Amino acid sequence: MVLYDIRKNAYYDSVTLMLISKEIKQIEGVAEVLVGMGTDLNKELSSNLGLGGEAIDGLSPNDFFIAAEVSNEQVMAEVVETVARLLTQKKASGDSVYRPVTLNAAKGMIPELNLAVVSIAGQYAEDEVDRLLEENIHVMLFSDNVSVEAEKKLKQKAVDRGLLMMGPDCGTAIINGIALAFANVVKRGPIGVIGASGTGTQEVTSLIDRLGSGVSQVIGTGGRDLKSEIGGLMMLQAFDALIADPETKVIVLISKPPAPEVAEKILKKVSETSKPVVVDFIGGDIEMIRKAGAIPCISLEDTAYKAVAAANGETAADFAGFEMSDAEISKIVDHAVSGLKPSQKFLRGLYTGGTLADEAMKLLGNQFGGIYSNIPLSPEYELENLNVTGKHTCLDLGEDQFTVGRPHPMIDPSTRTERMLKDIDESTAIVLMDVVIGYGSHENPAGEVADSVRKLKAKVGAPVVYVASITGTSGDPQGFESSKEQLEAEGVIVMPSNAQAVRLVGKMMHALAQKEA
Amino acid sequence: MSRINELFKQDLKVVNMGLESFYNDLKAQKVETIHMNWRPRAGGNPKMLALLKRLNTKK
């Protein structure tokens, strides 16, 4: 039976509620459950889950509801009680400071507010951000589902007022040494970064830290900034700020390939500064970057190497190899491939970071018969129905088809856990993964991967090879070293960067092909 | 000097609107921050929101 518990005018944030839904599903006698606010999306979701009904249809986004398919009313009573307990727990973990309802009241408490982090539902974001910019408050807009028209309007307003409007869908920034949303604890230093790609920026900044240098500022723009419609408004604005910033000696730009006219505009600006500029237009036109007098890069890792070299007044050649010696790499490859059974043929890339998944496919290229994906490099490799059987695959688990009604896999790794248990079998040779730590991320993503690997060892009767890299630093709350130890304890090969993990996998795939031939 | 360069010289004072975990992360970094008890205006009713917006722009 489907039962409901509804509370009018009780507001909770979506991530809290999604995490609670997940816990409630574990209760015996609960077949399906949705705990959420009465938004259109949740109404649709509850109807898709077979939980819909008049009780839900009449709700407003300010109304809280539990809809559950349960075996009897006692189970529902337990569900309601558990939700109440979990909500109180979440509240108790906070503090007792008053939470203002309006921006004016917030300003009354901290008069010199200078930055807002906004992660409310996208359809409400435009109005709120507009109001913040009116007050000359810089904005990091984490929310997605904000229209291109709204983005353009807000960014234009920010430019007119000399403000930051990072986003929408901006996942990472480090301002004045403070990590915002999904960001790592990176030492302060001479490198200023502007990134239109969240996990790409996290990878570059974490590696800058591990190479012994640091960042002055890390400014996110949101993924659409360099498309024609927005015209690079925020990247250009942030670039001017870093040129004027005395702490910034080197500027790094990270983005997926921009629209050609936007690339031209940005590179024109690049050619006019005397500060060294390191550019990674992931997979974009390298010659164009070189002509503008900037330093082009071949991977996120290469970007970090070249930025650190430039900060030290040096130039670095393309880094396309390994930190380990060739002999060590050969030994790892031989050992891994020689143990594989004849049934083990396929690669499974299971990524939580979209840019890292994209980089993996770009570095592996179209060899090995192509890699199928939900974000393929070309349309013929689009994965139908997410069915991975009989082909190499690389998934971005942060995409919408995996995240409806649940948090991003960097917050809730169970999306990947489920995919690992489903997709990895006797036909799997190699599994390639990212582990993104830092503020915003799950409290122990490496531990979750290690648990899954342990379960899979018992389940799959073949010696699958697991290769991972960790995006993060030793200063991160989860700790780089402790994350690495947990993975290695389960036999996962941990490489120093995504690029090196991918290159190692490439060598293994070649060796596997030779073995089969 | 743009307001961005002014920001680079100030201590961050942050208002958080939305996910509470971002507020907790800021506090863990000892940032002066405040979490708003944000909820959709006008109960999230699109018609009421449009009306409110028109009233505000006429002000």
Image (cartoon, coloured by chain):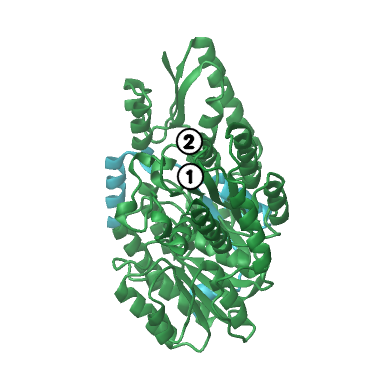
Badge 2 amino acid = Tyr
The answer to whether the residue labelled 2 contacts the one labelled 1, judged by CB atoms less than 8 Å apart, is yes
Local crowd at mark 2 within 10 Å, few (<14), some, or many (≥20)? Answer: some
Q: Which mark is residue A430?
A: none
Place residue A260 in its image quadrant.
bottom left
Q: State the image quarter where residue A326 is shown.
A: bottom right
**Residue A51 showing in the rendered view:** yes
> Which residue is the site of mark 2?
A11
- Which residue is rendered at x = 60% and y = 30% of the image? A86
Front-most of residues A403 and A41: A403
Disc 2 to disc 1, how far (Cα)?
8 Å
The colour chain A appears in is green
**In the drawing, does residue A43 fall left or right of residue B38?**
left
Looking at the image, which residue sits at the far front? A517
The residue indicated by pointer 1 is B38
Q: Position of residue A123 (x, y in %)?
A: 35, 47
Chain that bears disc 1: B
Give how far across and how far down residue A252 sits, in percent: 51, 75
Q: Amino acid at mark 1?
A: Trp
Q: Which chain is cyan?
A: B
